[in-house]
Image: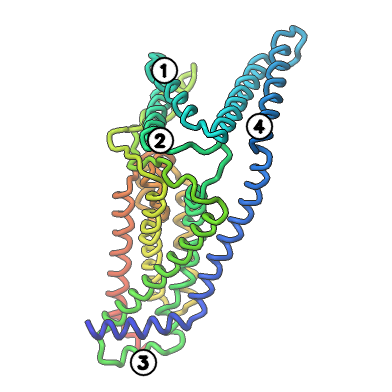
Amino acid sequence: MDELRRVFVNEWMKMMHRWRLWVTMGLAVLIVFAITVIDYNEYTTRTQFYMKSNLPKLIAQADQKIKEWQQELQNPKSTRNQSNIKDDIFNMTAEKQSFHDDLQILSGNGRGVLERDLTLLNYYLNDKKSKNNMEMYSARQVKKLELEYRLKHKVEPLPSWWNSSYFRTEQIIAQLSVLFLPMLVVILVADIVSGETTNGTIKLLLVRPISRLKILLGKWLVSLTATAVLVIGFYGFLFLINLGFYGHQGAFAPRAINVTYIFKSISMDNLGTPRMAAILNLNHVTLIPHWQYILTGFFLLMISLMVVATITFLCSTLFRSSMISTSVAFAVIIICQLVQWMFPIGKWIGWLFTVHLNLLSNWSGELSHDLQTNLTLPIGILVLSIWLVISIVVAAVYFNRKDMLSTL
């Protein structure tokens, strides 16, 4: 154990002096800052448009539009299709109601909006016709759970256009965890073994009275530690900058987890065209506050990126050139992503590690809905664990058996 500790300390000192660690940290901070600032500028413009003093004017404008379209609907000389006019009236009525709700929320009557929505939901859920559309019916049941959670825990709703720091953090994680963050991990880890092979410094390690497995294990632990540092820096800066821009509102908003589906083939139209319906299975659905969801996301992101680091570590062990190991690691991620995009539906796709890089989508059920197969959080962690174990075992066997000194 003492030998392993000394190897780890030695390798970590090397990591601290390498430019890759600081470049990846800088890129992560730069991208987060750029995305957040751009989004906040758009949000500021939206806030000015929907400010409390402007909402009555927007409601009046919506009323005027609805009256004009109702007159057009009754006009026999109208050249527009009546169904299109009805759609316009329906959409504008919904938008007008949204303006009313925002005005009520900003005036401090958010609870009244929640109680009204819950009454309407109960009406729809008790309507026999609504039960025929099982997708919408199950979605409304989850919405009912969320409304009841807000009323029970006295969680005020936010206006429809409002961005919370927790919601934006979740969105940015979903965007960057798929490709950008894995690429940073590749840059960080890809030369940890191959770089020393290229430079010839691997000889100094192998001639020491320390087993090869301990040397490799020490380097792997350093790779995981560096990845953890990257995640801590990225996640911490991401949340703090969003908290600074949007404030703490929305921390206790409900977030559904453990969501699974029952997939059924149904007829979509009168012609009998089939499609797959995703019906929510409410047996295991749980609601937790959004802050807890985001905090858990930190650990889930660390798990997924550590798997990426281990796969990259395998490439660094197999190839002597750091350029080749970096390229191969990039290629593995990109090819898996391409396969996922080309064949987005099918149970077998769940065995790709890239599918589970955002484990929050496993937890929330969004991944299951998109791929039309239940890929829960335990399944995602299991798949990533299999990739991790296979990668480190192959790397250990190769590194231990390869006659590296004679071929340098």
- Residue indicated by mark 3: 204
Mark 4 or mark 3, which is nearer to you?
4
User: Secondary structure under badge 1?
Assistant: helix
Per the image, the residue denoted by label 2 is: 150
Q: How many marks?
A: 4
Q: Residues within 10 Å of mark 4 (few under 14, many from 20)?
A: some
Image quadrant where residue 406 sits = bottom left
Which scheme is used to colour this image of the protein?
rainbow
Residue at (39%, 43%) from the top-left corner? 364
In the picture, the disc for residue 55 is 4
Counting from the top left corner in percent of width and height, residue 334 is at: 49, 59
Direction left: furthest residue: 1
Question: Is residue 169 or residue 182 the one in the foreground?
Answer: 169
From the image, tell me which residue sits under label 1: 123
Alpha carbons under labels 4 and 3: distance apart: 72 Å
Amino acid at dot 4: Leu
Q: Residues within 10 Å of mark 3 (few under 14, many from 20)?
A: few
Q: Secondary structure at mark 3?
A: helix
Tell me which label, 3 or 2, sits earlier in the chain: 2
Q: CA distance from mark 3 to mark 2?
A: 62 Å
Between 382 and 107, the residue placed more toward the observer is 107
- Residue depicted at 37% across the width and 82% down the height: 11
